[in-house]
Amino acid sequence: MEAVRDRILSHSLGLVSARGLSALSIGDLARDMELSRSALLAHFADREALQIGVIEKAATLFVHDVVEAATAAAAGEARLRALFGRWLAWSRSPRLTGGCPFVHASAESDALPPGVRGKLEDFMTGWSDALKASIDDAKAAGQLTADTDADQLVFELYGLYLSHHFWHWSMKDRMAQERTQRAFERLLAASRG
């Protein structure tokens, strides 16, 4: 039973990464997966429950692939670098056929049901907090200036990530990774004083 649920969520995650949460349809998904509609509804009571399940699945994978993997790096700037590098790699993961599902979901967040939007906001807040904690550790270690505004730096990191996502996925720019990395280095240099 759990294996079927996980297969549904994995397939749905691929769809969401390419087309967004709004594109998820119980009927279309059942047809794609050769399941009856009632079999799919046995796992997800409705479309909103499916959308929440996909966000939870994506969040679990993200925490594993990005946050937990980056803990191997020392706290501070090294961890911030690892988090950012793994974040960029996440958006190009083979399991994400169209990019970061959180980017797509955020773009349509106003149209999402409140429960789905709340799950998305919780995830995004948690991720922002993880970045801020890493920035604060770098400040405490003297690797970034004490007056570095962690909220501003997180804002700018998101800007780099969204730019990378656009240039990589929409424009098919083979230099997107390199350009983003150069911009990241400039941000860090400016935060060192």
Image (cartoon, helix red, strand yellow):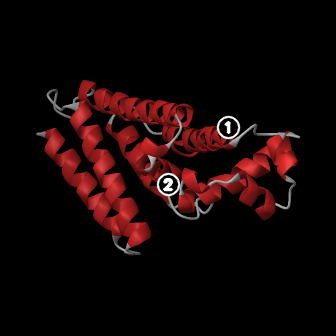
Residue 78 at x, y percent in the picture = 37, 41
Foreground: 31 or 173? 31
The N terminus: image quadrant: top right
Is disc 1 placed on a helix, strand or loop?
A: helix
Residue 30 at x, y percent in the picture = 79, 56
Foreground: 170 or 161? 170
Is disc 2 placed on a helix, strand or loop?
A: loop
Foreground: 63 or 167? 167
The C terminus: image quadrant: top left
Q: Residue at x 67, y 44 (%)?
A: 47
Figure quadrant of residue 43: top right
Q: CA distance from mark 2 to mark 1?
A: 20 Å
- Residue bearing the label numbered 2: 100
Residue 83 at x, y percent in the picture = 43, 43
Query: Looking at the picture, which amino acid does disc 1 mark?
Result: Ala
> On the rendered structure, is 86 left or right of 166?
right
Q: Residue at x 45, y 39 (%)?
A: 73
> On the rendered structure, is 12 left or right of 109?
right
- Residue bearing the label numbered 1: 49
**Local crowd at mark 2 within 10 Å, few (<14), some, or many (≥20)?**
many
Q: Residue furthest top?
A: 140
Figure quadrant of residue 31: bottom right
* Number of callouts: 2
> Of label 2 and label 1, which has the lower sequence position?
1
> On the rendered structure, is 122 left or right of 191?
right
Query: Looking at the picture, which amino acid does disc 2 mark?
Result: Cys
Q: Residue at x 19, y 31 (%)?
A: 149
Foreground: 30 or 148? 30
Q: Is residue 82 visible?
A: no
Figure quadrant of residue 130: top left
